[in-house]
Image: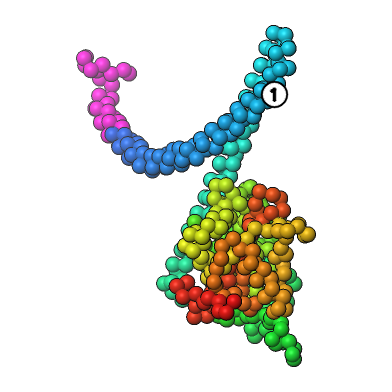
Amino acid sequence: MPYYPDREPESSGEEHKQPRITEKLKKFLRMSFAVVSGIAENLKKLLLPLFAAAVSRLAEMLKKLLPLIAAAVSWIVEKLKKLLHISAAAISRLSEKQKKLLRLSVAVISCLLIVYGTVRLIGYGKELNASRETSRELQQINEREKQEMQETQETKIPLSSPESIASASPLPAAFLTSPLPAAAPATPLPAETPQAGTADTRLKHVLYPDNPYAMISDRFAQLRKKGKYIVGWISFDLVDEAVVQKDNTYFLTHDATGNDNNNGAIFLDADISLLTRPYTIILYGHNMKSGNMFGRLKKYKESSFFRKHQIITFDTMYENGQYAVFAVMEMSTTPGVAMWYNLWSLATDIRADREDAIREIEKRSAVSSVLDVQADDQILLLVTCLDGDTERLVVAARRLRENESPENLVIRQGR
């Protein structure tokens, strides 16, 4: 029965229930409103910062892309101007209908080129952003693990124990130059014992002084959970990147976690084994115009930059290390040309030959250095491409020796 407040309700036994129901309904509505208001307030607090961050990132991306888009459009316009200038004589002889058709064709082609260039630039920007995001994620893991190492001494378990087998990340197939034995030895990996009469002429294998069992550090065990091919970390200038190793092509088009990305990753040459301390380490990275990866290596040709950023930190999953740059050179990978240099001449174990290879790098260097470099020093080579397909830029550094510091480097004497 409907309830009319301006007249007495008929006696039906419901007259005492109606006010009570109304009060309950009001109370329920008030509670519902309070709950909805609370949810709305929480959503506002949660979503607004995320929305603001997303808008800020989008604006930053657009800000970076606008100069590139403007440059592409300017280049296209310039090319079209030249084309039209060359064709001016031919155009003057065309009929009005043909001229109109030509103008329409040029306009359509121009629009298509602009659209294509814009799409490519947007794709480039997205890949660059994704590459930097991956780098930031790995940097956070790296910094966290380094901080933990500073606070507590890192615990290491022999690789032969069951705990290490359960916790250590597997080595990639291309990591080793020869297969590992089925079980790790109970004693440190044997160093090569020189034969009689060869001690002074040949280099011997060197175990890691503080890690003769070649155990993966806790820091890199965590990094390898994110990217299973991570074997090192390099830092200099604005570069702070993971180093990976698989083959010499995969990481040209993939980031350090294995995602498709034309920025690639910094990677260790596939033929270099880290089971013992290698005398020569070769790292490759793209020469990105954005400065990503090895895009800033060319600045080492400037003396001021060379001196300011002479120290490079390169840690592997077996040991940490600092290296001092002693040369920067341009070379060709084509045998027989004037700029040709064979990087693998440094891989020889004959002291005299390795000494000659080092002196050749020093002689070709664009910046002179007085740093002492000997055949038994560990050499780090950072390699990136130049304008030509066979041209390379190489930055060479040697590992700091025992009791040597960045402030007190050993300089060469009598040479």
Establish if 395 lies above or below 9. below
Query: Which of the pair 111/401 is nearer the observer?
Result: 401
Location of the N terminus (image quadrant): top left
Location of the C terminus (image quadrant): bottom right
Q: Report the residue marked by disc 1.
A: 86
Query: Which of the pair 27/254 is nearer the observer?
Result: 254
Residue 9 shown left or right of residue 292 in the figure: left
Residue at the location (61% across, 63% down)?
A: 365
Establish if 238 lies above or below 217. above
Residue at the location (47% across, 67% down)?
A: 146
Residue at the location (71% across, 17% down)?
A: 89
Residue at the outermost right position: 336
Residue 362, position as x, y percentages in the image: 62, 68
Residue at the location (59% across, 74% down)?
A: 373
Within 10 Å of disc 1 (Cα), the crowding (few <14, some 14-19, many 20+) is few
Residue 12 shown left or right of residue 187 in the figure: left
Which stretch appears magenta?
1-29
Establish if 206 lies above or below 78. below
Q: Which colour scheme is used?
A: rainbow
Asked where in the image residue 377 lies, by quadrant, the reply is bottom right
